[in-house]
Image (cartoon, helix red, strand yellow):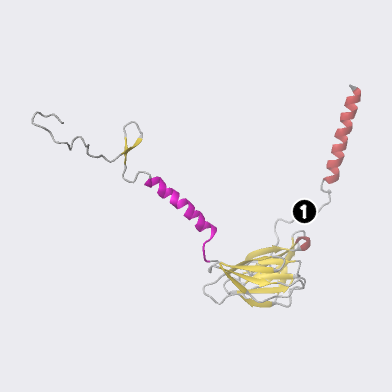
Amino acid sequence: MQRRSRKLAAIVAALVGATAAFAEPAGARQRPDTIELPTGFAPEGVATGAGGTFYVGTRTGGHVARGNIHDEADAEVFVDDPVVNAATGLKADVRHGLLWVAGGPTGQAAVYDLDTGDAGVALTLTTKTPSFINDVVVTRDAAYFTNSNQPELYKVPISPRGELGAVETIPLAGRGPGRRLRQRLQPQRHRRHERRPHAARRQQHDGRALHDRPRHRSQRADRPRHSDGDVR
Protein backbone atom coordinates (compact mmCIF):
# COMPACT_ATOMS: atom_id res chain seq x y z
CA MET A 1 0.00 0.00 0.00
CA GLN A 2 2.83 2.40 0.89
CA ARG A 3 4.58 1.53 -2.35
CA ARG A 4 1.45 2.39 -4.31
CA SER A 5 1.08 5.70 -2.44
CA ARG A 6 4.68 6.65 -3.20
CA LYS A 7 4.15 5.89 -6.89
CA LEU A 8 0.97 8.03 -7.01
CA ALA A 9 2.77 10.90 -5.25
CA ALA A 10 5.58 10.71 -7.79
CA ILE A 11 3.10 10.92 -10.70
CA VAL A 12 1.34 13.95 -9.16
CA ALA A 13 4.68 15.68 -8.59
CA ALA A 14 5.66 15.09 -12.22
CA LEU A 15 2.37 16.53 -13.49
CA VAL A 16 2.71 19.60 -11.28
CA GLY A 17 6.24 20.16 -12.55
CA ALA A 18 5.12 19.88 -16.18
CA THR A 19 2.29 22.35 -15.62
CA ALA A 20 4.66 24.85 -14.03
CA ALA A 21 7.04 24.49 -16.98
CA PHE A 22 4.31 25.51 -19.46
CA ALA A 23 2.86 28.28 -17.27
CA GLU A 24 3.36 31.90 -18.33
CA PRO A 25 6.33 33.51 -16.55
CA ALA A 26 5.43 35.87 -13.74
CA GLY A 27 7.14 38.78 -15.45
CA ALA A 28 5.55 38.20 -18.86
CA ARG A 29 4.21 41.33 -20.56
CA GLN A 30 0.42 41.51 -20.93
CA ARG A 31 -1.28 42.73 -24.11
CA PRO A 32 -2.79 46.19 -23.77
CA ASP A 33 -6.58 46.52 -23.77
CA THR A 34 -6.49 49.66 -25.93
CA ILE A 35 -4.05 51.03 -28.49
CA GLU A 36 -4.55 54.62 -29.57
CA LEU A 37 -4.64 55.42 -33.29
CA PRO A 38 -3.40 58.67 -34.84
CA THR A 39 -5.66 61.69 -34.49
CA GLY A 40 -8.36 61.93 -37.14
CA PHE A 41 -8.31 58.25 -38.09
CA ALA A 42 -11.62 56.69 -39.15
CA PRO A 43 -10.59 53.02 -38.95
CA GLU A 44 -12.20 50.42 -41.17
CA GLY A 45 -9.93 47.41 -41.71
CA VAL A 46 -7.05 45.87 -39.80
CA ALA A 47 -4.36 43.43 -40.92
CA THR A 48 -1.76 41.52 -38.90
CA GLY A 49 1.84 41.00 -39.92
CA ALA A 50 4.86 39.33 -38.40
CA GLY A 51 5.77 39.56 -34.71
CA GLY A 52 2.49 41.06 -33.53
CA THR A 53 2.62 43.96 -35.99
CA PHE A 54 -0.75 45.28 -37.13
CA TYR A 55 -1.85 47.79 -39.77
CA VAL A 56 -4.99 49.94 -39.71
CA GLY A 57 -6.37 52.06 -42.53
CA THR A 58 -8.61 55.12 -42.45
CA ARG A 59 -11.61 55.72 -44.68
CA THR A 60 -10.70 59.38 -45.04
CA GLY A 61 -7.38 60.22 -46.64
CA GLY A 62 -6.08 56.69 -47.24
CA HIS A 63 -3.33 56.78 -44.59
CA VAL A 64 -2.25 53.58 -42.82
CA ALA A 65 -1.08 53.33 -39.21
CA ARG A 66 1.17 50.63 -37.76
CA GLY A 67 1.49 49.33 -34.22
CA ASN A 68 2.21 46.20 -32.22
CA ILE A 69 -0.24 44.26 -30.08
CA HIS A 70 2.53 43.47 -27.57
CA ASP A 71 3.40 47.12 -27.08
CA GLU A 72 1.49 49.74 -25.12
CA ALA A 73 2.77 52.50 -27.38
CA ASP A 74 0.32 54.30 -29.65
CA ALA A 75 0.09 53.29 -33.29
CA GLU A 76 1.92 55.67 -35.61
CA VAL A 77 1.33 56.75 -39.19
CA PHE A 78 3.04 54.24 -41.45
CA VAL A 79 1.85 55.31 -44.90
CA ASP A 80 2.03 59.11 -44.77
CA ASP A 81 1.85 59.71 -48.53
CA PRO A 82 -1.07 57.57 -49.75
CA VAL A 83 -1.68 57.12 -53.47
CA VAL A 84 -5.39 56.33 -52.95
CA ASN A 85 -7.71 58.54 -50.88
CA ALA A 86 -9.33 55.75 -48.84
CA ALA A 87 -8.11 52.64 -47.02
CA THR A 88 -10.71 50.03 -46.09
CA GLY A 89 -9.65 46.38 -46.15
CA LEU A 90 -5.94 45.59 -45.80
CA LYS A 91 -3.70 42.56 -46.08
CA ALA A 92 -0.08 42.23 -45.00
CA ASP A 93 1.59 40.05 -47.63
CA VAL A 94 4.64 38.83 -45.73
CA ARG A 95 5.60 36.40 -48.51
CA HIS A 96 6.05 39.17 -51.10
CA GLY A 97 6.81 42.05 -48.73
CA LEU A 98 3.73 44.03 -49.80
CA LEU A 99 0.88 45.81 -48.04
CA TRP A 100 -2.38 45.60 -50.02
CA VAL A 101 -5.04 48.24 -49.41
CA ALA A 102 -8.60 48.36 -50.75
CA GLY A 103 -9.67 51.84 -51.82
CA GLY A 104 -13.36 51.91 -50.90
CA PRO A 105 -15.45 54.24 -53.14
CA THR A 106 -12.48 55.20 -55.32
CA GLY A 107 -12.64 51.99 -57.38
CA GLN A 108 -8.90 51.64 -56.81
CA ALA A 109 -6.42 49.71 -54.71
CA ALA A 110 -3.01 50.65 -53.34
CA VAL A 111 0.13 48.58 -52.80
CA TYR A 112 2.95 49.68 -50.48
CA ASP A 113 6.27 48.31 -49.29
CA LEU A 114 5.53 46.27 -46.15
CA ASP A 115 8.73 47.38 -44.39
CA THR A 116 8.80 51.10 -45.16
CA GLY A 117 5.31 52.08 -46.32
CA ASP A 118 6.85 53.77 -49.37
CA ALA A 119 6.81 53.06 -53.11
CA GLY A 120 3.05 53.20 -53.33
CA VAL A 121 1.40 51.94 -56.50
CA ALA A 122 -2.21 52.83 -57.38
CA LEU A 123 -4.23 50.21 -59.26
CA THR A 124 -7.45 51.10 -61.06
CA LEU A 125 -9.72 48.11 -60.54
CA THR A 126 -12.92 49.50 -62.05
CA THR A 127 -14.44 52.73 -63.37
CA LYS A 128 -18.04 51.61 -62.78
CA THR A 129 -20.21 53.63 -60.44
CA PRO A 130 -21.24 53.05 -57.81
CA SER A 131 -18.33 50.95 -56.57
CA PHE A 132 -16.90 50.20 -53.16
CA ILE A 133 -13.66 48.20 -53.06
CA ASN A 134 -14.22 46.64 -49.67
CA ASP A 135 -11.67 43.93 -48.93
CA VAL A 136 -8.74 41.93 -50.24
CA VAL A 137 -7.50 38.36 -49.98
CA VAL A 138 -3.95 37.40 -50.96
CA THR A 139 -2.83 33.97 -52.18
CA ARG A 140 0.55 32.69 -53.26
CA ASP A 141 0.24 34.12 -56.78
CA ALA A 142 -2.52 36.77 -56.74
CA ALA A 143 -4.53 39.30 -54.76
CA TYR A 144 -8.32 39.38 -55.05
CA PHE A 145 -10.43 42.46 -54.29
CA THR A 146 -14.19 42.58 -53.66
CA ASN A 147 -16.67 45.22 -54.81
CA SER A 148 -19.70 45.67 -52.56
CA ASN A 149 -21.69 47.47 -55.29
CA GLN A 150 -20.84 45.38 -58.36
CA PRO A 151 -20.99 41.59 -58.92
CA GLU A 152 -17.28 41.40 -59.68
CA LEU A 153 -13.92 40.36 -58.26
CA TYR A 154 -10.61 41.85 -59.33
CA LYS A 155 -7.49 39.74 -59.59
CA VAL A 156 -3.98 41.17 -59.50
CA PRO A 157 -1.36 38.53 -60.40
CA ILE A 158 1.85 38.43 -58.34
CA SER A 159 5.10 36.90 -59.57
CA PRO A 160 7.40 35.00 -57.17
CA ARG A 161 9.58 38.14 -57.04
CA GLY A 162 6.63 40.34 -56.06
CA GLU A 163 6.03 41.92 -59.47
CA LEU A 164 2.43 42.86 -60.23
CA GLY A 165 0.53 41.85 -63.34
CA ALA A 166 -2.40 43.48 -65.13
CA VAL A 167 -5.74 43.71 -63.33
CA GLU A 168 -8.26 41.05 -64.36
CA THR A 169 -12.03 41.40 -63.82
CA ILE A 170 -13.90 38.26 -62.76
CA PRO A 171 -17.69 38.60 -63.23
CA LEU A 172 -19.85 36.88 -60.63
CA ALA A 173 -23.18 36.87 -62.50
CA GLY A 174 -24.62 33.46 -63.35
CA ARG A 175 -25.87 30.29 -61.71
CA GLY A 176 -24.42 30.52 -58.24
CA PRO A 177 -24.82 27.88 -55.49
CA GLY A 178 -27.63 29.85 -53.83
CA ARG A 179 -29.70 29.85 -57.01
CA ARG A 180 -29.20 26.12 -57.55
CA LEU A 181 -30.33 25.47 -53.99
CA ARG A 182 -33.50 27.51 -54.51
CA GLN A 183 -34.22 25.63 -57.72
CA ARG A 184 -33.86 22.29 -55.94
CA LEU A 185 -36.18 23.30 -53.13
CA GLN A 186 -38.86 25.06 -55.17
CA PRO A 187 -40.03 22.02 -57.21
CA GLN A 188 -40.45 20.06 -53.99
CA ARG A 189 -42.88 22.66 -52.67
CA HIS A 190 -44.82 22.51 -55.93
CA ARG A 191 -44.99 18.73 -55.89
CA ARG A 192 -46.51 18.71 -52.41
CA HIS A 193 -49.40 20.83 -53.66
CA GLU A 194 -49.78 18.96 -56.95
CA ARG A 195 -50.33 15.52 -55.43
CA ARG A 196 -54.09 16.27 -55.24
CA PRO A 197 -54.61 19.11 -57.73
CA HIS A 198 -58.42 19.06 -57.41
CA ALA A 199 -58.65 18.32 -53.72
CA ALA A 200 -60.08 20.84 -51.26
CA ARG A 201 -58.74 20.74 -47.73
CA ARG A 202 -61.24 21.04 -44.90
CA GLN A 203 -60.78 20.88 -41.16
CA GLN A 204 -62.89 18.41 -39.24
CA HIS A 205 -64.10 19.01 -35.71
CA ASP A 206 -61.59 16.48 -34.37
CA GLY A 207 -58.66 18.49 -35.82
CA ARG A 208 -57.76 16.12 -38.66
CA ALA A 209 -57.12 17.61 -42.08
CA LEU A 210 -58.82 15.58 -44.83
CA HIS A 211 -58.89 15.83 -48.59
CA ASP A 212 -62.29 15.89 -50.32
CA ARG A 213 -61.99 13.98 -53.51
CA PRO A 214 -64.03 15.30 -56.46
CA ARG A 215 -67.38 13.66 -56.68
CA HIS A 216 -68.30 11.76 -59.87
CA ARG A 217 -71.77 10.88 -61.04
CA SER A 218 -72.60 7.27 -60.51
CA GLN A 219 -73.03 5.17 -63.61
CA ARG A 220 -75.96 3.50 -61.85
CA ALA A 221 -77.77 6.85 -61.53
CA ASP A 222 -77.50 7.43 -65.28
CA ARG A 223 -79.25 4.15 -66.14
CA PRO A 224 -82.94 4.53 -67.19
CA ARG A 225 -85.60 3.89 -64.59
CA HIS A 226 -88.86 2.06 -65.35
CA SER A 227 -92.33 3.00 -64.16
CA ASP A 228 -92.12 0.71 -61.15
CA GLY A 229 -89.04 2.60 -59.89
CA ASP A 230 -86.66 -0.28 -60.35
CA VAL A 231 -83.41 0.17 -62.12
CA ARG A 232 -82.77 -2.59 -64.60
Q: In front here: 121 or 182?
A: 182
Find residue 25 and report its horizontal and vertical position in percent: 84, 49
- Residue 77 placement (x, y as % from top left): 71, 71
| Range of residues picked out in magenta | 173-194
Q: Is residue 175 magenta?
A: yes
Nearest to the observer: residue 36 or residue 157: 157
Q: Is residue 152 left or right of residue 160?
A: left
- In this view, the residue farthest toward the left is 227
Q: Quadrant of the N terminus?
A: top right
Q: Amino acid at mark 1?
A: Gln
Q: Is residue 99 visible to us here?
A: yes
Instruction: Give x and y (percent) for residue 203.
Output: 32, 37
Q: Position of residue 86 (x, y in %)?
A: 62, 72
Lateral position of residue 190 relative to residue 203, left or right: right
- The C terminus appears in which quarter of the rendering? top left
- In the drawing, does residue 231 fall left or right of residue 136? left
Residue 105: quarter of image: bottom right
